[in-house]
Image: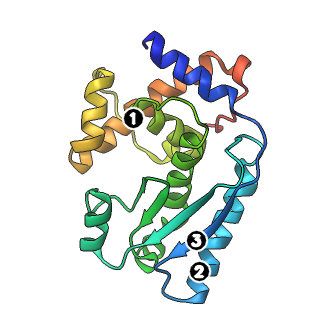
Amino acid sequence: MSFITFISFITFITFISSSHLTAQRIQGAQSQAERLRLEDIINTLEQRYQDSFQTAGGSTIQLHITQDLQQYKQLTGAQQWHAGHFKHGIIYLQRIAVLEQRGILEQVIEHEYLHYLIQRTGSSPLPLWFEEGIVLNLSGEIRYFDCPAQPYTAPDQLNHLIRNGTQAQVKRAYCQAAQMTQWLLKSIYSLTHLPLPTQ
């Protein structure tokens, strides 16, 4: 871990405090019931993380539900097997009914919401592998990954795989990013008091 990366991490840690976050703009909801469902999820996440993050006052997060895979790929540049994507202050989601049917709606929104929180700290941008690792650990998603033992992958290569790899390669990269980040966070847990999930 380079000195610059370490400074970025410490800068991020210094912004951890209490906050009040809101979600006011939800675009593309198919019904009032769907909009209320999304607002309920965001409100729950606000409650869960409001004591752990401080963000700039008055900012809001936007949710954009895309109408089909073509629109999703056009707006995000992400592969179609990515259920959600955070970009320029907006969480883009595939169709809510599809995510609900797959049983991953809340998990996907929480993952992208954590990207929002981390990037709203005002700290210098974190390396992609490091940010993904923090998200996977804070959300607890890593517990649902079947992470095999695998050779060490350099951080730059992890970044490349996360951006451009196949679905299987991205999953393996996520596993390594989460494990590396967890080790780093646990190493300084006594100083940061990050709410690491119970494994």
Q: SS at mark 2?
A: helix
Residue designated by label 2? 35
Q: Amino acid at mark 2?
A: Arg
Name the front one of labels 2 and 3. 3
Q: SS at mark 1?
A: helix
Residue designated by label 3? 25
Q: Please rate how many residues cluster around mark 1, counting C-alpha atoms within 10 Å: few if below 14, some from 14 to 19, many from 20.
A: some
Q: Is residue 84 left or right of residue 107?
A: left
Q: Quadrant of the C terminus?
A: top right
x, y percent for residue 165 = 22, 43
Mark seen at residue 128: 1
Q: Please rate how many residues cluster around mark 2, counting C-alpha atoms within 10 Å: few if below 14, some from 14 to 19, many from 20.
A: some
* Viewer-side residue, 114 vs 60: 60
Q: Quadrant of the N terminus?
A: top left
Residue under the point 67% across and 45% down: 56
Name, please, the residue furthest toward the front. Answer: 58
Q: Amino acid at mark 3?
A: Arg
